[in-house]
Image (spheres, rainbow, N blue to C red):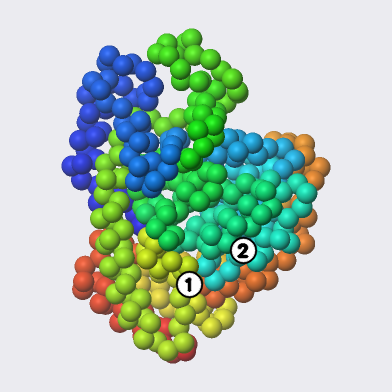
Amino acid sequence: MPGFEIFGDEERKEVQDVLDSGILFRYGFDQARNNHWKARDFEKELAEKIGSGYCHLCSSGTAALSVALAACGVGTGDEVIVPPFTFVATVEAVMSAGAVPVFADIDETLCLDPESLEKAMTPRTKAVLVVHMCGSMAEIDRIRAFCDQKGIVLMEDACQALGGSFNGKHLGTFGKVGCFSFDPVKTVTCGEGGGVVTDDPKIYEIADAYGDHGHDHVGDDRGAEGHAIMGVNYRISELNAAVGLAQLRKLDRMVEIQRTHKGALKEALGRIPGLEFRKIPDEEGDSATFLSFFLPDEATAVKASGELAAAGVDGCFYWYSNNWHYIRQWDHILGLKSAAPLPVTLFETRPDYEKLNLAQSDGIMSRAISMLIKLSWSQDEIAQRIDKMTAVLRPYF
Ligand SMILES: *Cc1c(COP(=O)(O)O)cnc(C)c1O
């Protein structure tokens, strides 16, 4: 997954352009910038690449989620259905919008289970925020059908899914908005950055204004621009955008390498009778950043995960006990431990997270291990990895 493995002259050149012009701001300074518009170019190329009408870059994936929520009109008093397996940012963004995250179960895709949505619905449900975890996808067609039928908004957190698709359509383009992250460990990285994509010009317009204090970006006198709505500063800088632009141009190559590496590992481990992999609704659209598989139960998964580490198989994650990606350790979020008083409705409708029953998700996550696929592996390293992993895993089946 990490694009930082392949930084090169391409990134250097884009950054140099920015430094030479002296303009780190993404807007204005038309004369001084020598025609370098890194953020604008990145937005255009990303939208084209994934087949989306519009893209607005932000300072992070978390900021992109906040911008997307604002643009979809999600706020105080609304409920948003989210999965319990995601990076905490998804949940934080919903809460900071003043909305209430309502957790629904995941299935073997490691993403929201379309079957779990109905019982999470209430009259306050405004949106489903599906997260395409670990480079692959949810049953996005079924989830979209559910949202259409209920008349609620579908939003996609595709922060981990750049380069992934479902039936040929890029992840992040199924809902009203899709969000991407370019943080230091994502497939395409620019240090810190994110993007909101949409086909809806109105949503784009709000996102573009909200992420920059409400500026409508009409005309070339920044001081005289209109401000139809209030906003914040979630802008990306030209320096970050420059790195991201060069990285984006390497995306196809990255995904190709990941798929080859993952294919070799999956084929070899698939020879262990009984070992099951994560369900991938469209194998061809897997961006292949992770290889996820299931052990028979929690005890064997804990044991195998320790043994893999001891055998030198690095990059294996047992998310079930991880502090940031699975709900079990989110005591700060479940306890609503806020630095300042909570938005009133979030406080008043204070969800009873103590009573959450996510037995299905627990059952799946307690058995799952995910291994990060690296771009830099040699054939030799892959062969050794296969040997070590087979030796550890085979006895459990
Ligand atoms: C990385 C990530 C985010 C947040 O992105 P940042 O750029 O780190 O703010 C949100 N959701 C998911 C699923 C992520 O993996």
Is the residue marked 1 within 8 Å of ligand 1, measured from its CB? no
Q: What residue lies at 71% left-to-right and 61% top-to-bottom?
A: 118
Mark 2 residue CB less than 8 A from any atom of ligand 1: no
Q: Secondary structure at mark 1?
A: loop
CA–CA distance in space, label 2 to label 1: 16 Å
Instruction: Identify residue for label 1.
Output: 278
Pinpoint residue 287: horizontal percent, then vertical percent: 37, 60
Q: Secondary structure at mark 2?
A: helix
Relative to 64, say whether 16 is above or below. Answer: above
Confirm or deny contact between disc 2 and disc 1 (CB under 8 A). no
Residue 389 is situated, as x and y percent measured from the top left of the image, at: 36, 79
Disc 1 marks which amino acid? Arg
Task: Indicate the amino acid at tag 2.
Answer: Pro
Q: Nearer the viewer, residue 175 or 231?
A: 175
Which residue was labeled with disc 2?
A: 114
Local packing at callout 1 (Cα closer than 10 Å; few below 14, some 14-19, many 20+) is: some
Q: Quadrant of residue 143?
A: bottom right
